Amino acid sequence: MDKFLIRGGKPLKGTVKISGAKNSALPCLAATLLTAETVTLHNVPYVKDLITQRRLLEDLGATVLTPELHTHKVRAANIEIYEAPYDLVKTMRASVLALGPLLARFGQAKVSLPGGCAIGTRPIDLHLKAFEQLGATVSLEAGNVIARAPNGRLVGADTFFEKVSVTGTENVMMAASLARGKTTIHNAAREPEIEDLAELLNKMGANIKGAGTETITIEGIEDLGEADHTIIPDRIETGTFIVAAAITNGELEIKNCHPKHLAAVIEKLRETGVEIEVADETLTVKCGGKKLRSKNVTTEPHPLFPTDMQAQYMALMTQAEGTSTIVETIFENRFMHASELVRMGADIQISGNTATINGKTKLMGAPILASDLRASASLVLAGLAAEGETLIDRVYHIDRGYETIVRKLCGIGADIERITENLTMSAEEIK
Ligand code: UD1
């Protein structure tokens, strides 16, 4: 397994470019299953989750061409299988996004039920309930969800999400695009990725209104067609680089981003004393040697502070003066980075869904273990701020969602290298 070796203490300086949003590219790739025509997606980040999503499309029978590294041309004209198998779903929960498109276009879908994951149980019951409201019959057989649309087509309906769900909203929006009649999604997720998917679907011919608000209406149509679409920039990668500049007392220009997508993050970081200048698609971040202030935060659905920035914010709060609390309201087990930060010298107590951080403590490099995607990002940030060497194991988590992170960090002055373990045993060792 690959590791990252970081020699910390260097202020990051220079310019970094943000990649396309993983969490937008994943549903947009799934949406290509809704049509037999070619859908071209630009600005698709080259990260492990997208490679997995591409494999899923190809396993189902779609042709995926990549004329350029970040462009995917998908033609799902010859889909023969309607199934997302366990070996894919277990590595990436977002494979459940195949359920809505397959069910809508072919009237049937089988998707392995995702189990628990590192950050909690993460059920998909709300997706399934909404599909039932659209007329599907849903059953569970041998760990698989089997959904069928009677007479082969879903029927538009009023759906209500008891809890805001991002992929749930996306799944239903895709399914309802090809349903007969009108669907309304109440208490829909409002993330920018929902708006991006709706924009793609509308380019494909769908009739979706209200994406980005809590009520989305979809007038179903018979067929969707070809489209050309550019994925929005990754707001979580953007936020991670803002923290990277702040935690190393550096100065960064962050390009190709959409600052308005992370307004709550920018506002909170400004409260802590981070100086952030916002231009159209560029952010400039500096600390100017000032002390950071501790500020409390609670994670909430968009447009409030995102759970996907919680771990990175915790790393920053270890370097702020005073006590701060972080309340995690979205996932029940999302503080696994805390114990690793403590091993590096942080003072953090966890009680239920609240973390209390006493700062500022000196961070010292240590061998540490990444547990999930955003936790890995927080450990990289801590390693960049720490004195001495930090060796992060299980960085496959970070490869799922951060494009060429080592190259990007080296480009702005970090001392970080990837160590690829040589698994070949010598003849002597085999004996
Ligand atoms: C998406 C993001 C993930 C982010 C999360 C919250 C993608 C690919 N992933 O995940 O990065 O951390 O939103 O912003 O976009 N829930 C249920 N039943 C359901 C669905 C969800 O109880 O059927 C619960 C979840 O367990 C969780 C909460 O609702 O507690 C929100 O989950 P959800 O918004 O669905 O997260 P994901 O879409 O899986």
Image (cartoon, rainbow, N blue to C red):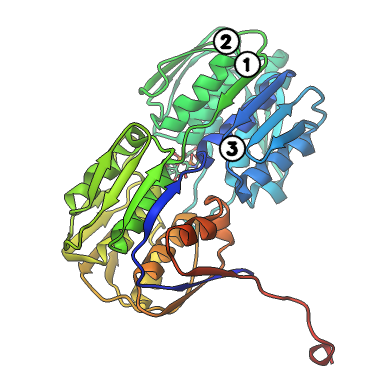
Q: Nearer the viewer, mark 2 or mark 1?
A: 2
Contact check, label 1 and label 3, Cβ < 8 Å: no
Classify 10 Å Cα crowding around label 2: few (below 14), some (14-19), many (20 and above). Answer: many
Answer whether labels 2 and 1 touch (C-beta < 8 Å): yes
Q: Distance of mark 2 from mark 1, alpha carbons?
A: 9 Å
What element does badge 1 sit on? loop
Residue 429, located in which quarter of the rendered image? bottom right
On screen, residue 389 versus residue 316, left or right, reads right
Residue 308 percent coordinates (x, y)? 40, 48
Q: Is residue 113 visible?
A: no
Q: Secondary structure at mark 2?
A: loop
State the residue position of label 3: 44
Choose the circle earlier in sequence order: 3 or 2.
Answer: 3
Q: Are marks 3 and 2 in contact (CB under 8 Å)?
A: no
Tell me the SS state at disc 3: loop
Question: Going 41% across and 57% down the picture, which residue do you hit?
Answer: 333
Q: Quadrant of the N terminus?
A: bottom right
Q: Which residue is mark 2?
A: 220
Which corner quadrant of the image does residue 338 belong to?
bottom left
Residue 248, horizontal then vertical, whole percent: 32, 64
| Residue matched to label 1 | 154
Q: Residue at x 44, y 59 (%)?
A: 377
